[in-house]
Amino acid sequence: QQQVKQSPQSLIVQKGGISIINCAYENTAFDYFPWYQQFPGKGPALLIAIRPDVSEKKEGRFTISFNKSAKQFSLHIMDSQPGDSATYFCAANDDYKLSFGAGTTVTVRA
Amino acid sequence: DTGVSQDPRHKITKRGQNVTFRCDPISEHNRLYWYRQTLGQGPEFLTYFQNEAQLEKSRLLSDRFSAERPKGSFSTLEIQRTEQGDSAMYLCASSTVLYDEQFFGPGTRLTVL
């Protein structure tokens, strides 16, 4: 039973466009929400993270939006570049255990 | 500053054999985690240690799986009597006590024939 639901499964965006990935959760005990980027054959790399007392966090071209009442959060990748082509996972932390979404494969076309 | 390292990176074994993986966390990190990732899925939590103490184990961790972290440094994950369903990427992550950020290693890809 997946505790974090992620959508879409895949998306294609033009270079310079915006990629948007959405996640939803039910467990209100989750207290920390990171996003990871993973390239084929590599381990996940921490990209950006947010806590539920903050509604938005921006780092460079990456922004997390968090809606605590709706129990939803999303990742926006601005000015998408071919090097951003990867699989992105949202996750949620409860008592040191991360629960991951199923992942979104992002393809950026030049 | 070296990151989390894992060894071996790839392991091919026959069904029924035992395998052991090693993880070396970031040096000042006293929490260490094991996750399993199958193709097309996100990582799933298996177990975690704080220093040498194993504090939680997932129901995914059957009795064929055992993990240790002697002296609170590196950790090993052993799978006994491997099954084809054990084929996956085994990921190790580490963090400090103060912060929730978990940093992952490159993983060990296990293939059970």
Image: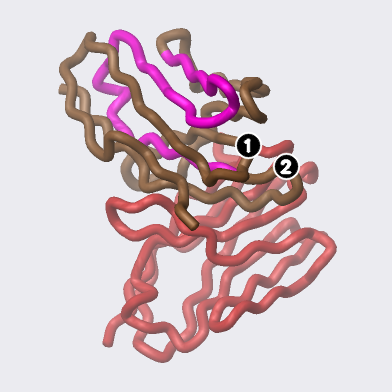
Residue visible at 18% across and 28% down in the picture? B12
Image coordinates of residue B31 in percent, x first then y, are 63, 36
Residue A32 vertical position relative to residue B68 in the rendered view, above or below? below
Verify CB contact (< 8 Å) between mark 1 and mark 2.
yes
Kind of residue at disc 1? Arg
Q: Quadrant of the C terminus of chain A?
A: bottom left
| In the foreground, A94 or A74 | A94
Q: Which residue is mark 1?
A: B31
At mark 1, the secondary structure is strand
Q: Going by the image, does A15 lie left or right of A21?
A: left
Q: Residues within 10 Å of mark 1 (few under 14, many from 20)?
A: many
Residue A42 vertical position relative to residue B51 in the rendered view, above or below? below
Residue visible at 58% across and 70% down in the picture? A75
Q: Which residue is mark 2?
A: B97
Chain in brown colour: B
Q: Is residue B89 magenta?
A: yes
Q: Quadrant of the N terminus of chain A?
A: top right
Magenta residues, start to end: B65-94
Residue visible at 68% across and 38% down in the picture? A96
